[in-house]
Amino acid sequence: MDARVRGQGGVVLTLTFEVSDRLYEAAQEWADRRLEDIDEAMETKVEQALLEIEHLVSQSHDVAFEVDGREIRYEPTEELAALLRRQAEESGIDESTALKMHVDLYANAFLDDVTDEQKPPGTPSE
């Protein structure tokens, strides 16, 4: 975890964590289905997860993060940072681990459950 000073005197938290195998495998599946490379797919899956988390907590519709292989760096909104801080204190983990757990929950979100090849004949596509 890294803290920097925000322009208005607040502290900006930069959280860093390694993606789980579960998230990596979901990104690989995303890449395979869309013929993307794993780096693009990892960015997509992390963005999806962070957007969902931030929207639920802070109503934010924008996230900026960095992906370096399997390492993620993210500056949460003040609302999310406060939630992660509370959760970390309550559970005895750090904020980065709390965020990693939330991101991991969304690992398989947005993946198609059934591909067209797996559908019974005559089933309409969505």
Image (cartoon, helix red, strand yellow):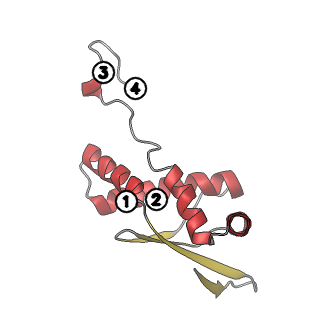
Disc 3 or disc 4, which is closer to the eye? 3
The amino acid at mark 1 is Met
Classify 10 Å Cα crowding around label 4: few (below 14), some (14-19), many (20 and above). few
Determine if residue 50 is in view.
Answer: no
Image point 72% across, 69% down: which residue?
A: 89
Residue extending farthest to the top is: 122
What residue is pinned by disc 4?
A: 126
Q: CA distance from mark 2 to mark 1?
A: 6 Å
Q: Are marks 3 and 4 in contact (CB under 8 Å)?
A: no
The amino acid at mark 4 is Glu
Q: Are marks 2 and 1 in contact (CB under 8 Å)?
A: yes
Image point 70% across, 85% down: which residue?
A: 7
> Which of the labelled discs sits on residue 42, or is there none?
1
Q: Are marks 1 and 4 in contact (CB under 8 Å)?
A: no
Secondary element at tag 1: helix
Secondary element at tag 4: loop
Pick whichever of labels 3 and 4 is earlier in the sequence.
3
What residue is pinned by disc 2?
A: 46
Determine if residue 77 is in view.
Answer: yes
What residue is pinned by disc 3?
A: 119
The x and y percentages for residue 1 are 57, 80
Image point 26% across, 14% down: which residue?
A: 121
Q: CA distance from mark 1 to mark 4?
A: 25 Å
The image quarter containing residue 70 is bottom left
Image point 23% across, 49% down: which residue?
A: 35
Secondary element at tag 2: helix
The residue nearer to you, when weighing 21 against 116, is: 21
